[in-house]
Image (spheres, grey):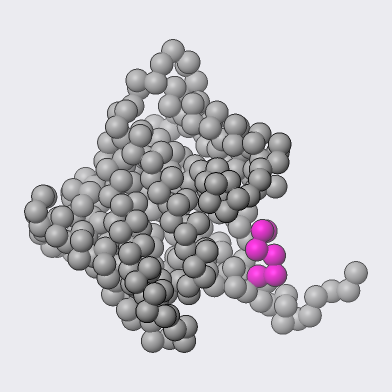
Amino acid sequence: MDNPPVNARESERRAILFALVAVALWSTVATGFKLGLRELAPVQLLFLGCLVALAFFAAARPFVTATLTLRQHFIAAALGLLNPLAYYLVLFEAYDRLPAQIAQPLNFTWAIALALLAIPLLRQRLSARGWAGIGVGYAGVVVLLTQGEFDGFGRFDPLGTALALSSSVIWAMYWLLTVRLGIHPVPLMLNGFAVATMAVGAICWMTAGLPALNLRVVGYGAWVGLVETGVTFLLWHRALALTGNAGRIGQLIFLSPFLSLILIANVLGEDIHPSAVVALAMIVGGLALSRR
């Protein structure tokens, strides 16, 4: 087989580099969420994150030549009510109620929820391998919530558990809707964050109150706005644009939750239960199986 052209090899190396940086950054967000929620209410953390992300995408917009129709502008803005508004409010509430080692794997089941939602929304059919992968993934959820002792599910806050699983469905729904639109991610996110920031600000003002700012609090907002949704999102998008094998690049995301557990243990000081590692391996394994 002939070797690929030099330009193609260089493009692939850059794609892998961008993807690995994105994965490394995403692996920090569970820790960042928990640290931020120690000082801020979920809606306050989201408000700061939205402000930072809105500023980032507004700064990036002049560098993107993509144009949107009036209808696309409206749809992109309306989707901001789904993500970031609904998704992150639900996700942060889950993180506020659960240990990070529980909330993070539950949220990672979004990709399995995606496969299920694609059946009615995209009229896709799942193979037997796909159904097996979904079964393995959700069996991992059972292991996670019972910690391997199948005598009940009462070990963790039930509302937090429901919220974490719901967040995976919200994100999967958002992903399916945006894929069908085909809008460039920068104007898509800019419109969404413009609407969501106003809505979150109003909710924050009427409930927890606007956050008192200091350097540490602003840092948590930047963590959410840049590492979770801003810079990392564009790095991942760039990696997929450069690669000739999107499937191989996509598999790198499986590294993120395991790296995240290391940070959760060493930064947050959580004692990682062995069942959390086993459950996460089952969830990731189920996802990989269903993707095949």
In the image, is 137 to the left or to the right of 159?
A: right
Q: Nearer the viewer, residue 219 or 130?
A: 130
Query: On the image, which quarter does residue 269 sit in?
Result: top left
Residue 245 drawn in magenta: yes
For the point 26% across and 67% down, the residue is 195
Residue 61 shows in this picture: yes
Q: Is residue 33 left or right of residue 114?
A: left
Q: Position of residue 193 (x, y in %)?
A: 30, 67
The residue drawn where x is 43% and y is 27% is 145
Q: Is residue 5 magenta?
A: no
- Counting from the top left corner in percent of width and height, residue 287 is at 60, 43
- Tell me if residue 152 comes above or below residue 111 in the rendering: above
Judge by depth and name the residue closer to the eye, 208 or 171.
Answer: 171
Magenta highlight range:
243-248
Residue at 56% x, 35% y: name it.
Answer: 137
Q: Quadrant of residue 106?
A: top left
Q: Percent from the top left, x then y, of residue 32? A: 33, 52
Q: Is residue 262 visible?
A: no
* Left or right position of 211 against 33: left
Horizontal and vertical percent position of residue 146? 44, 22
The answer to which of 103 and 118 lies nearer the viewer is 118
